[in-house]
């Protein structure tokens, strides 16, 4: 879902937080709450979820989000993927 979409052109195939009853214009202060508000007020699904794009563990040796974003902008696809459960369990045992 594209958040803060009240003043943006929405790419084809994307949902946005600017439909029906919304607070999309408050996104700069409320962040993903504008998306949750959109879901609450405009959808009737029994179950919904929210996954924040910055909170994944990656298998790529990147020391910070800034470096990750820079690599993506410069190289495009950096062959990063979410860490598999077994791999994550192994990481957690070392900590």
Image: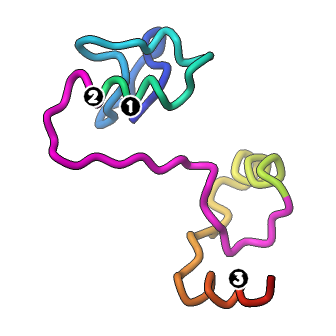
Q: Residues within 10 Å of mark 2 (few under 14, many from 20)?
A: some
Mark 2 or mark 3: name the one nearer the start of the chain.
Answer: 2
Location of residue 44 with respect to 25 vertically, above or below: below
Specify the label residue 40 is tagged with: 2
Label 1: which residue?
36
Location of residue 54 with respect to 80 vertically, above or below: above
Query: In the displayed structure, does residue 90 sit left or right of residue 95?
Result: left
The image quadrant of residue 5 is top left
Location of residue 23 with respect to 68 vertically, above or below: above
Mark 1 or mark 3: name the one nearer the start of the chain.
Answer: 1
For marks 1 and 2, give the CA distance. Answer: 6 Å
Label 3: which residue?
92
Magenta span has 66?
A: no
Image point (52%, 82%), residue name: 85
For marks 1 and 3, give the CA distance. Answer: 31 Å
Residue 22 % position (x, y): 34, 13
The image quadrant of residue 12 is top left
Specify the label residue 71 is tagged with: none
Seen from the viewer's position, the closer of residues 9 and 90 is 90
In terms of secondary structure, where does tag 3 sit?
Answer: helix
* On-image quarter of the C terminus: bottom right
Image point (41%, 12%), residue name: 23
- Decide: marks 1, 2 in contact (CB < 8 A)? yes
Q: How crowded is mark 1: few (under 14 residues within 10 Å), some or many (20 or more)?
A: some
Q: Give the range drawn in magenta.
A: 39-63
């Amino acid at each position: 879902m594209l958040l803060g979409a009240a003043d943006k052109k929405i790419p084809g195939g994307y949902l946005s937080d600017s439909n029906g009853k919304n607070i999309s214009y408050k996104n700069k202060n409320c962040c993903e709450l504008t998306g949750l508000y959109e879901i609450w007020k405009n959808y009737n699904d029994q179950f919904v979820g929210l996954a924040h794009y910055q909170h994944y563990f990656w298998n790529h040796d990147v020391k910070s989000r800034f470096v990750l974003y820079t690599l993506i902008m410069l190289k495009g696809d950096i062959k990063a993927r979410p860490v598999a459960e077994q791999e994550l369990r192994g990481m957690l045992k070392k900590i």
